[in-house]
Amino acid sequence: MPERRPVFQEVLGEDWAKLGEVIRRHYFLRSFSDDYICVKGVMHEVEHSAFAKVLLPFARIVGALVPYRGRDVPIEVHYTARPEDGTLHWDRVFHFAGRKPFHFRSRMQQTGPNQVIEFVRFGVGMRLKVTAEEGAMVFRDVGYVWRLFGYDLPLPVGLLLGTGYIEERPIDDRSFSMRMTLRHPLFGELFRYSGVFSLPEEAPGSAVAEG
């Protein structure tokens, strides 16, 4: 059997080669494997609007978003592939001053070319279009779903949360920037966080990056 390729190489196809090397090394994880990587960094800002406070109780129930504000917040993100179901699991650990570490967990599954769904609790998921743009990996929200008995039912959550945008952009051969926003068409920007991360010294090498 041919060697399995990274999940996001399958998602992006030929556009995988357009990503910066540090991004390809970051996303080396293969489906149905036990691949793992942890990146560490600092979130220079973690913000939400006054209107967003109304949404936070619902978001906490389903395990989505970050309920605190902060500057220069240390963070590590654990990425784990699951051999039993082909999903990738994220555990983002925010270290806000004076608080217990806050975990924002999710799992991601490929659903087609340039398409993934990121799930939080109770089967609630965000459908994302994935592209490679000027070396960056870009995720654009294309709607929410509720996975019920194996079916992905559309959810009108976007009417409350607006539209999500995430990017990871290379800085040098070991570091990258990250930015996430949720913007509502009427209430403007509801959530945002951004920061800089570094790969561990023993991250996968150029052979994985080149694909």
Image (cartoon, rainbow, N blue to C red):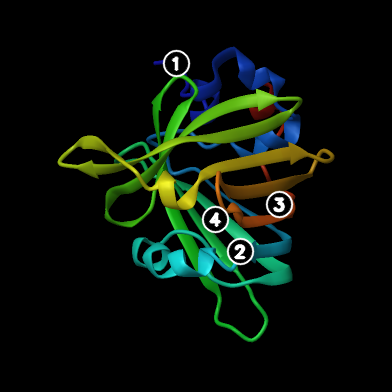
24 shown above or below 2: below
Q: Which residue is mark 4?
A: 78
- Give the residue furthest to the right: 172
Residue 40 vertical position relative to residue 16 in the rendered view, above or below: below
Residue drawn where x is 64% and y is 28% of the image? 208
The residue indicated by pointer 3 is 200
Q: How far apart are the alpha carbons under marks 2 and 4? A: 24 Å
Dot 3: few (<14), some (14–19), or many (≥20) neighbours within 10 Å? some
Instruction: Give the mark nearest the N terminus, 4 or 3.
Output: 4
Q: Amino acid at mark 1?
A: Pro
Q: Is residue 124 above or below residue 154?
A: below
Q: Quadrant of the C terminus?
A: top right
- Other-residue count near label 4 (Cα within 10 Å), few / some / many at <14 / 14–19 / ≥20: some
Spatial separation of the CA atoms under disc 3 and disc 1: 28 Å
Q: Mark 4 and mark 3: span between their CA atoms?
A: 12 Å
Q: Nearer the viewer, mark 1 or mark 2?
A: 2
**Disc 2 residue type?**
His
**Residue tagged by mark 2?**
48
Front disc: 2 or 3: 2
How far apart are the alpha carbons under marks 1 and 4?
A: 27 Å
Q: Secondary structure at mark 4?
A: strand
**Residue 50 visible in the picture:** yes
Which residue lies at the image location 27% right of the left edge and 55% below the top edge?
A: 122
